[in-house]
Image (spheres, helix red, strand yellow):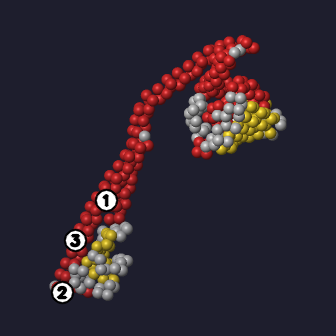
Amino acid sequence: MGLYVSSLFILFAFIAYLFYNLSYNYYLDDTRHKIQLKAHELSSKIIFAHMNGKFLDLKKLANSDYFDIAFLDKKKNLIAGKKLDLNNLSKHFIVQKNRVLLVDKSSFGHLGVEYILLGDSHFGQKIDSIKKEILFYLAFIYIIVLIIGYFLAKLFIKPIHLSRIQLDNFIKESTHELNTPISALLMSVDAKKSSMDKNDERIKISAKRIANIYRDLTYLFLRDKNDKVVKPLDLTKIVEKEIKAIYPLARKKKIKIVSNYENPLIYEMDEESAARLVSNLLSNAIKYNKPGGFIGINVKNTTLSIKDGGIGISKKAQNEIYKRFFREESSEGGFGLGLNIVYKICKEYDIKMDLISKKGEGSTFIFNF
């Protein structure tokens, strides 16, 4: 849309420029012709009067409603007419900002007139009028192009918009359908308790991963903002709950989780948002950690920090990781939704988030509530 409008505007601006140049040259030539004819007429009258010994009132002759006329002698002194500020009389035709001037010497000193100066101020007025007309029509055309472009854009984007709505509906419906089989899997595995074998453990871990993805998709697409309940929450309890939920994943990679809470961290927000924030950070800390690594969780005053000894994030990627679907490492699973959700939650609840990370040495996410 922008390219279409800009291209047309440049095209019309170029046409307007060509039209202005054509009009300027036309009116300049027309003015030059008129002013030269007037100069020849005045020169003829002066020569005729002088040759025939007749009296000629130069002041009356210099009086004109259309032209500015001045008669100068050989020393460039004004004999009659208007005083025209022109020091250089060597040029024959001069174009100034508001008028055109002609220096004519065809009187040859008759009646003491060496120079006839003629000025035409109407030229500047005509050029100003043309400029205003061009700008008006250019603005009018630009508005018409914008209106046409807007409706064309709506017409072309409509199928894309409809496809997007269909895709969103499909995601919502398929996400909703995931809940039943995930819940059934987890309940079936948990029912075995002490009799669980390694295969059951793998099923439980995989089901929890799917459950986490399901919760992310639900949070993004199915959550009704009117139904959320904002209340004071102890975030240390949310952290402990999410550690317990994600512990099987950490145990599989032999990752040690160490938590230290110097004080309760109370903050007003809805419980699902708090759970999504902590869960996604812990999930990433496990996913991108090294086997046998660690996760350190610390609460002090109003600050929550989650540190891992994983692969770290490059400086280049640190500005991109909060974008939806962005993944620096494609070797691990996921859809690139986790940190985007974390970023949205922080923005919604005015939580300041900082990241300290170095490639190959791990990452620390710090949240100031």
Q: Which residue is mark 3?
A: 37
- State the image coordinates of residue 227 (x, y, percent, origin top left): 67, 24
- Badge 2 density bin: few <14, some 14–19, many ≥20, Cα 10 Å: few
Is tag 3's residue or tag 1's residue first in the polypeptide sequence?
1
- Identity of the amino acid at label 2? Gly
Q: Is residue 86 above or below residue 170?
A: below
- Identity of the amino acid at label 3? Leu
Question: 144 or 219, which lies in front?
Answer: 219
Is tag 3's residue or tag 2's residue first in the polypeptide sequence?
3
Is residue 134 visible to us here? yes
Residue at horizontal 58%, vertical 36%? 329
- Identity of the amino acid at label 1? Asn
Q: Nearer the viewer, mark 3 or mark 2?
A: 3
Q: CA distance from mark 3 to mark 2?
A: 24 Å
Q: CA distance from mark 3 to mark 1?
A: 24 Å
Q: Nearer the viewer, mark 1 or mark 2?
A: 1
Residue at horizontal 75%, vertical 30%? 239
Q: Secondary structure at mark 1?
A: helix
Q: Which residue is mark 1?
A: 21
Is residue 62 visible to us here? no
- State the image coordinates of residue 221 (x, y, percent, origin top left): 59, 26
- Numbered tag placed on residue 145 in the rendering: none
The residue most toward the left is 52
- Badge 1 density bin: few <14, some 14–19, many ≥20, Cα 10 Å: few
Q: Secondary structure at mark 3?
A: helix
- Badge 3 density bin: few <14, some 14–19, many ≥20, Cα 10 Å: few
